[in-house]
Amino acid sequence: MKAIDIRFNPEEIDLLRSLVGKKLLSVLHDPFTFVNSSSQIVQLNAEEGNFYLYSFTEPLDYFGSKEDVAVWSFEKERCKAADRKNFIETPCGEKIVSVSLVQEHQCLFKGEEQLYDVRLTRGLIIDFGDHQLSFEKAVWFSEDIYIRKGNDLLDGFAPVSSFVENDWEPGISAGCSREVLRLE
């Protein structure tokens, strides 16, 4: 069985947790054209300084073939690619009540034998109390970070059924579960 874990690591989770109770001043992202997304980088400006949500591809095993897979990270360090961005700044100015990590556990089976055990961070949701701001990795390969504002934003994430009901080859079945880790 092949195990792949591309969730946020404990240091990244602690960094996200450090935002709780602080004011999010603004979000910097690519200009929205057809969809509300930013390619590779979103910058969060908080009272504590700047934070970066990155989505860069790495060559990984994707269910039997080597593919460029988008892997997320959350850091305080600004990368050189951010210098080439033509960001727009969206003001926020609100206190963060909690941050929720949306984690998935994907499994692939051939008959009864488990072939893959994959764990990944699907997205994060910042809760301001009366509304939310979410960032989602909707597609395994895409470096796009989808950004939404509103309420009950987890409902707008790609459903786990989209993975389970994928067009797998005959004899292959999939399972997927999702959990939300609330950081307070």
Image (tube, rainbow, N blue to C red):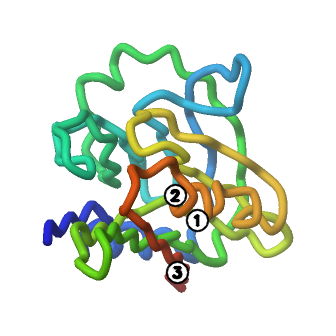
Quarter of the figure with residue 119: bottom left
**Disc 1 or 3, which lies upstream in sequence?**
1
Badge 2: how crowded within 10 Å, few (<14), some, or many (20+)? some
Q: Quadrant of the C terminus?
A: bottom right
Would you say 176 lies left or right of 31 here? left
**Between residues 110 and 138, which one lies in front from this camera angle?**
110
Residue in the foreground of this view, choosing between 146 and 80: 146
Identify residue type, mark 2: Phe
Q: Say whether marks 2 and 1 touch (CB < 8 Å).
A: yes
Task: Tell me the SS state at disc 3.
Answer: strand
Res 45 visible: no
Residue at 32%, 71% (x, y): give it. 109
Kind of residue at disc 3: Glu
> What is the distance, in whole Å, between disc 2 and disc 1 at their CAs?
6 Å
- In percent of width and height, residue 7 lies at 31, 65
Relative vertical location of residue 146 with respect to residue 166 in this rendering, above or below: above
Q: Residue at x 71, y 17 (%)?
A: 33
Label 3 neighbour load within 10 Å: few <14, some 14-19, many 20+: few
Label 1 crowding class (10 Å Cα cut-off): few <14, some 14-19, many 20+? some
User: Real-space Cα distance between discs 1 and 3?
Assistant: 11 Å
Residue type of the residue flagged with mark 1: Val
> Is any part of residue 122 visible from this angle?
yes
Marker disc for residue 163: 2
Comes first in the chain, label 3 or label 2: 2
The quadrant where residue 118 appears: bottom left
Residue 110 location in percent, x, y? 29, 68
For mark 1, what is the residue?
Answer: 160
Q: Which mark is residue 124?
A: none
Mark seen at residue 179: 3
Closer to us: 90 or 10: 10
